[in-house]
Amino acid sequence: GQNIDQPTEMTATEGAIVQINCTYQTSGFNGLFWYQQHAGEAPTFLSYNVLDGLEEKGRFSSFLSRSKGYSYLLLKELQMKDSASYLCAVRADNNAGNMLTFGGGTRLMVKP
Amino acid sequence: DSGVTQTPKHLITATGQRVTLRCSPRSGDLSVYWYQQSLDQGLQFLIQYYNGEERAKGNILERFSAQQFPDLHSELNLSSLELGDSALYFCASSDTRSSVDTQYFGPGTRLTVL
């Protein structure tokens, strides 16, 4: 089975940097995804990591360490519109489809 | 806009009833996934279809069933509805032929069971 942990809530200030951590335990690993979800809306894809290291995409970066079962999402130059939930999801390495297992999400509140 | 469409956007029904949720994947995507999101739980994977065939099953109740049609749209059928089935139901699709195989989510159907 899989277990994914991330903090429930975080608060940060507009213009600052925030790091959202995700730890996972899985019987197999075939990629880690980060999604952003505004309340009542669909999750939208942010980033994908399958190899160790940092992936940068504009103001957002995501890091993965497979040996530690650890990832983080880094958001720079925070804007009010970044207030949302951030979901970490792991894809298992098996032949039973490409299902994702999601963590409970981290609700980020950006304050002026 | 992800390119995944879902209908209806909202559904209000009574306990014991049956409903059908519909999803059309992005053009070219062969895989469709269904998820349930309740207030007290995160996104829970229900079931995946690939090119018309069931590929993976998650925590889907026996009262729930799904299918994917030849035109690749999918339907999720929920029967003998209970209050606890009230949730957001998302459909996602992906191009399983790509190595990344990112899932793109539709806008969801909000189901309220009274």
Image (cartoon, rainbow, N blue to C red):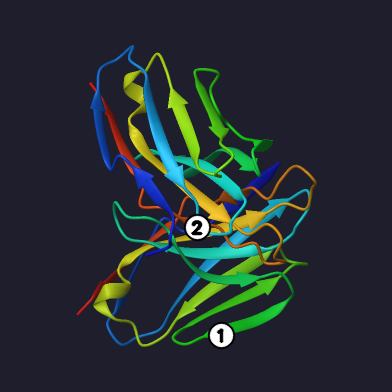
Specify the amino acid type for callout 2: Arg
Q: Which sits in the foreground, A50 or A4?
A: A50
Amino acid type at image mark 1:
Glu
C-beta proximity under 8 Å, tags 2 and 1:
no
The C terminus of chain A - image quarter = bottom left
Residue B58: image location, x then y, percent: 61, 35
Q: Alpha-carbon neighbours of circle 1 within 10 Å: few (<14), some, or many (≥20)?
A: few
- Which residue bears the numbered disc 2? B26
Query: Residue at 68% across / 50% down in the picture?
Result: A98
Q: Which residue has dot 1 on it?
A: A56
Q: Position of residue A55 (x, y in %)?
A: 61, 82
Height in image: B109 above or below A47? above
Quarter of the picture containing the N terminus of chain A is top right
Camera-side residue of B66 and B63 = B66
Q: Can you tell which of label 2 and label 1 is closer to the viewer? A: 2
Q: Residue A78 placed where, x, y %?
A: 33, 82
Instruction: State the separation of the CA atoms marked 2 and 1.
Output: 26 Å
Query: Is B56 positioned to the left or the right of B28 in the image?
Result: right
Residue B41 seen from this side: no
